[in-house]
Image: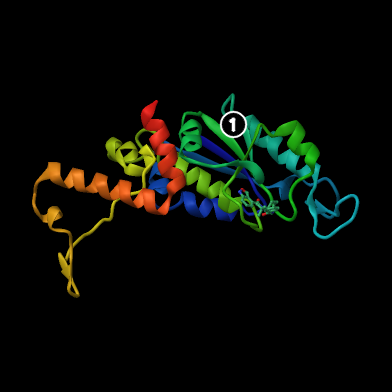
């Protein structure tokens, strides 16, 4: 899968595709991440990527021309059918189902904003979908793009060593994870639950399931409600 990211800070995007599971996926040719900087597509002598908002007010707005230039260049390289996704607080909140949908694509272009955002006409004419990371104020869309890429890449077949680990984990089924423990079995007087030492795989699975359900009910009643609704259908 290929990601084309339009950003004024390409180093931010490159940093994460150089490390960990994403780094290995890139090395193995399963994932390609390319950045396009609007700064390289400026029209005026000063190379400005932002300008004052019509109607006045604080802050600056990302200019249409440098963005459309960067997007046009990205589109030449992007696989056919790649949607243009704008990371923005106006978008639908990103979730695991959306990550799954994106992981089925050949490619996608991600637009990360800065300042107060981008000229609305660019969104109307060039953006296929808006996606938000959540309800908080950020200074740029890069971190949201990184989060989207991270969650999507690990779902691409072959990226994680063990195919089971992607969808077997509780969260993929809509539940929180049960508590995890590793050695030593007794740490400063704190022992681990006996069942985990029993070697009884059926009992361990039952305990983990029960813990996942209890934790989800208590901490995330919204997830619990959605999980129960999903089970019935
Ligand atoms: N943020 C809100 C209301 C009004 C503005 C913002 C805000 C960065 C380019 C957008 C923020 C949050 C989640 C992108 C927030 C996200 C952004 C995101 C984002 C610079 C313009 C801006 C939601 C609090 C009501 C700045 C809330 N997911 N504007 O943050 O890009 O993707």
Q: Is residue 22 left or right of residue 78?
A: left
Q: Residue 185's spot in the image, x, y percent? A: 15, 64
Q: Is residue 52 above or below residue 229?
A: below
Q: Residue 116's spot in the image, x, y percent? A: 75, 54
Q: Is residue 59 above or below residue 25?
A: below
**Measuring 51% from the left and 28% from the top, which residue is drawn there?**
106
> How many numbered dots are placed on residues in this image?
1
Residue annotated with mark 1: 78
Q: Is residue 59 left or right of residue 174?
A: right
- For the residue pair 151 and 172, the one nearer the viewer reads as 172
Q: Residue 202's spot in the image, x, y percent? A: 13, 41
**Measuring 65% from the left and 30% from the top, which residue is drawn there?**
76
Q: Quadrant of residue 169?
A: top left
Residue 59 seen in render = yes
**Measuring 52% from the left and 44% from the top, which residue is drawn there?**
148
Q: Residue 18's spot in the image, x, y percent? A: 45, 51
- For the residue pair 37 and 96, the one nearer the viewer reads as 96
Can you say which quadrant of the picture contains the C terminus?
Answer: top left
């Amino acid at each position: 899968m290929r990601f084309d990211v339009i950003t004024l800070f390409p180093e931010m995007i490159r940093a994460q595709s150089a490390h960990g599971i994403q780094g290995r996926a890139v090395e193995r040719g399963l994932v390609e991440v390319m950045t396009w900087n609007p700064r390289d597509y400026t029209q005026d002598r000063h190379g400005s990527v932002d300008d004052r908002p019509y109607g006045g007010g604080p802050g600056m707005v990302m200019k249409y021309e440098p963005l459309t230039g960067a997007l046009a260049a990205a589109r030449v390289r992007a696989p056919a059918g790649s949607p243009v996704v704008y990371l923005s607080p106006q978008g639908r909140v990103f979730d695991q189902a959306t990550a799954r949908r994106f992981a089925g694509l050949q490619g996608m272009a991600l637009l990360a904003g800065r300042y107060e955002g981008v000229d609305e006409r660019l969104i109307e004419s060039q953006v296929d979908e808006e996606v938000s990371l959540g309800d908080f104020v950020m200074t740029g869309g890069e971190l949201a793009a990184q989060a989207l890429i991270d969650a999507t890449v690990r779902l691409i077949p072959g990226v994680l060593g063990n195919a089971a680990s992607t969808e077997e984990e509780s969260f993929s089924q809509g539940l929180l994870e049960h508590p995890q423990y590793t050695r030593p079995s007794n740490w400063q007087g704190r022992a681990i639950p006996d069942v985990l030492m029993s070697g009884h795989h059926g009992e361990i699975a039952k305990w983990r399931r029960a813990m996942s359900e209890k934790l989800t009910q208590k901490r995330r009643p919204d997830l619990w409600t959605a999980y129960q609704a999903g089970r019935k259908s």
